[in-house]
Amino acid sequence: MKHLLPVKVATVTSGAESTDRQFAGRVKAVQSVDLSFQVGGKLDRLNFLEGEILPKGTLIAELDDRDYRRRVKEARVNLELLEKTLKRQRSLAGSKVVSQQQLDEVESNFNLAKVALEKAEQDLAYTKLRVPFDALATRQLVENYTNVQPGQAIVRLQNISEVRIQISVPEKMLATVSKDRISSVNAEFEFLPERAFALEYREHQAEADSVTQTYIVELGMPRPENVQILPGMTARVKVKLKEEKGDLWIPLAAVQTGADGNPYVWQINADQSVSRAPVALGRTDGESVQVVEGLSPAMKLVAAGGQHLYDGAKVRNYAQD
């Protein structure tokens, strides 16, 4: 047995990776915003509680609108007066009593009055603050009955129109697993046993974490009825991968490079001798590599110790000693 060279033996396998992956996920808001009025005034009403879920369109704050309603009335009266004046001027212009210049000025003032009324009505509408999306009220930023300025933050909201979950994905998986390879992605929550929620890809960070070398991937799902899944909660995310037919993988350490630069492996024959087998390689996950051409399933290869082998050399598996 001394003439048998000790090597590590590997077998060509179908599929380098497990078809199921599991990640720890954390729920986050779609976005976090501070809402403010576009006009200033005295805060007259706050209609929310911190931690409350607010449907889109909910009225959550109002300013004292008396001054704004008065401005609308003034603008409307001024417009009506100018409309009457314009009618008289147009009738007089036909008899040459009013010049064209005078008529143009009245028409301009009438148009400006329409703009002023539109602005006054818009400012009046701005005295009411409504939720722009399904939201969680996380913080009240001012007290009621205080004077607020345009743009001053009133309430902090988190957009929860859908559930977003972030997971950290290893760089090799992000690089080697294509979208077509993913069969399903589901989220599970400890407080909802035996329920799984389908997730869809939303976005991912383009830079890896400098310490863990993982990428943040964000997934989304519709908000389930009668269940409060809030930002900060944890989830278990399961990724199921499809089996690829004819997908052969070997240890990356089994690959040798010939003098011509082409890759090959040492195939172990039935009589324990080895022979050089050229291979064509595909993608790699850093530990295993896909073999596109040159091998068949269940073939025995030299996985380590093949640097000094030659065609016809006989080997033994040192793991069996």
Image (cartoon, helix red, strand yellow):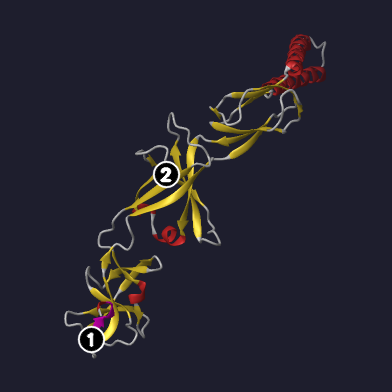
Of badges 2 and 1, the one in the foreground is: 1
Residue kind at label 2, given as amino acid type: Glu
- Which one is in front, 166 or 108? 166
Left or right of 20 on screen, residue 132: right
Left or right of 39 on screen, residue 163: left
- Rounded to the nearest angstrom, the CA distance separating label 2 from label 1 is 53 Å
Name the residue tied to disc 1.
314
Which residue is painted at 54% across and 59% down in the image? 209
Main secondary structure along the magenta-highlighted residues = strand
Left or right of 61 on screen, residue 291: left
Q: Is residue 241 placed above or below 283 in the rendered structure?
A: above
Residue 178 image offset from top left, x and y in percent: 38, 56
Q: Is residue 86 placed above or below 2 in the rendered structure?
A: above
Q: Is residue 321 placed above or below 214 in the rendered structure?
A: below
Label 1 SS = loop
Label 2 SS = strand
Residue 269 image offset from top left, x and y in percent: 19, 80
Residue kind at label 1, given as amino acid type: Lys
Span highlighted in magenta in the image: 315-319
- Residue 40: quadrant of the picture: top right
Q: Earlier in the sequence, mark 2 or mark 1?
A: 2
- Which one is in front, 106 or 33? 33
Q: Is residue 156 placed above or below 267 in the rendered structure?
A: above
Q: Does the magenta stretch include residue 55?
A: no
Name the residue tied to disc 2.
200
